[in-house]
Amino acid sequence: MSTSLDNSVLAARNLCVGYGEIPVLHDVSVGVAPGEVVALLGRNGAGKSTLLLALGGILRPSAGVVALGGKECTTAAHRRARDGLAYVIEERGVFTGLSVLQNLRLGQGTVDDALAIFPELEPHLTRSAGLLSGGQQQMLAVARALAAKPKVLLVDELSLGLAPLVVERIFRAIDEARSTGVGVMLVEQHSRTALQVADRAYVLDQGRIVLDGAASDMLPRIDEIEQAYLGVGGQ
Ligand SMILES: Nc1ncnc2c1ncn2[C@@H]1O[C@H](COP(=O)(O)OP(=O)(O)O)[C@@H](O)[C@H]1O
Ligand SMILES: [Mg+2]
């Protein structure tokens, strides 16, 4: 499970992270290369969001290294954002009291770039973001993140509560970003969907990486993987 810090746009090596005295992640090493989509799978409470929070600079590791663009990185979240790390958090990070346009202006990219990614948002620019559907809010969050032209995008539970067609649409935008060289790390409950989109995947269980490999190798074993690690099928 070697993870080169040099080839990865974002990597963690031997990361230990917890909340106060409570350890959650143990010796976790992961990496995302430019133009690669990596899925992070695991049952509820496995530590997926905690790992993204540590990669994003929101949680400080107690041991181990995070590297952005091949360089060890200990900076705060806002600085990592300026250095090319975009992060769509589980709660989407949309300001519901502001309009769609105001939300887009809060991003680091231009409104035009955001609308080029999701033209669907254009008719809603003056609406309050709180009045959008869940899918439109997620498009807004992803549009704002990708308009910043990040080197790497972290997305937590993108598909939660969304209709399959909307999820497909958003994954298409992520796939386009990948083709321009953006590295993507996705946390996903829907492991099949994730493995269909991803190049590679890691499975996290109780704060440890228990499996990693090419998505194309994991997809045919999905039933076995779900039973063993993802709490699907009789658990
Ligand atoms: N703010 C917090 N304070 C204390 N423990 C937390 C906090 N957030 C998450 N945890 C714990 O950390 C573990 C991993 O949580 P999380 O990373 O959210 O898992 P996942 O995203 O895989 O569902 C869980 O046991 C959870 O209860
Ligand atoms: Mg989570």
Image: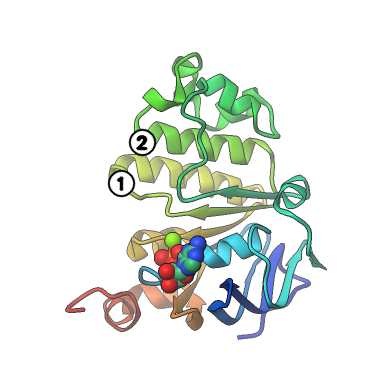
The local secondary structure at tag 2 comes to helix
The local secondary structure at tag 1 comes to loop
Task: Using the image, tell me which numbered label, if any, was put on residue 3.
Answer: none
The verdict on label 2 being within 8 Å of ligand 2 is no
Q: CA distance from mark 2 to mark 1?
A: 8 Å
Number of numbered discs visible in the structure rendering: 2
* Residue at the (73%, 74%) spot, across then down: 65
* Residue at the (43%, 77%) spot, across then down: 217
Of residues 7 and 216, the one nearer the viewer is 7
Of residues 87 and 26, the one nearer the viewer is 26
Task: Using the image, tell me which numbered label, if any, was put on residue 134.
Answer: 2
Residue 235 picture location, percent across and down: 21, 79
* Residue at the (75%, 67%) spot, across then down: 67
For residue 177, side relative to residue 190 (left or right): right
Residue 64 picture location, percent across and down: 71, 79
Q: Height in image: 221 above or below 49?
A: below
Q: Which residue is mark 1?
A: 161
Name the amino acid type tagged 1.
Gly
